[in-house]
Image: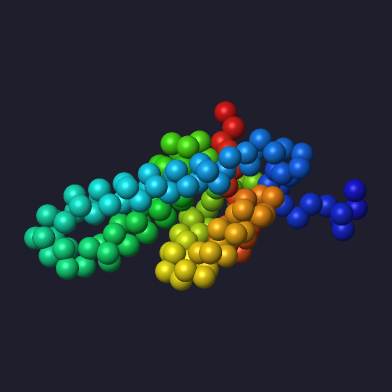
Amino acid sequence: MTAAMAPTTALPDPQRYPEFYASVNRKRLVAWIADVTLVVILALIATPFTAFTAVFYFPFLMFVIGFLYRWSTLASGSATWGMRLMAIELREDDGLRLSGQTAMLHTLGYYVSMAMAPLQLVSIILMAVNPRKQGLSDAVLGTAMLNRMA
């Protein structure tokens, strides 16, 4: 194979290794529900420690807790706890786990797309039609959600 024909990513080829991408979108949705539920619980637990003033800025508190939760779990294990529960993980285009910087950028991209409905719609469509099931942040960063293989 010549350099011009070499693959541009070390991620598994979805045609040759479909098991890495099987049911990833469904698992991603369940993981997202688990993660959002956990962030709500964490924000509720944190509220008394703000002398209950967090009731006035609860969405902002959820944003901060959610951002830190997502960034730290992606940086430490390439998956949030919801993703780990569903046995999926994010990988960079070189096939390795996410670096702290990529985890932060992925989290930032996630929050930007969640804040703008058209971007979230584009992300959902991309996950449905892309062979690697990549959302918008994944496509921009070159990351992909894979089934974790034991």
> Is any atom of residue 93 visible in this view?
no
Tell me what residue is drawn at x 76 percent, y 42 percent: 15
Return the x and y of residue 95 as percentages of the image width and height: 64, 46
Residue at image point 43% right, 49% down? 32
Q: Which of 89 and 57 is in front in this view?
A: 57
In the figure, 126 relative to 132: above or below? below
Identity of the residue drawn at 75% across and 55% down: 8
Image x and y of residue 19, in percent:
66, 35
Whether residue 1 is visible? yes
Going by the image, does 45 lie left or right of 23?
left
Name of the residue lying farthest toward the left: 51
The image's colouring method is: rainbow
Locate residue 133, reporting x and y percent.
62, 50
Residue ranking furthest to the top? 150
Image position of 140 (left or right of 37): right
Quadrant of the image containing the C terminus: top right
Q: Which residue lies furthest to the right in this view?
A: 2
Residue 50 in which image quadrant = bottom left
- Residue 46 locus on image (x, y percent): 19, 54
Q: Nearer the viewer, residue 25 or 88?
A: 25
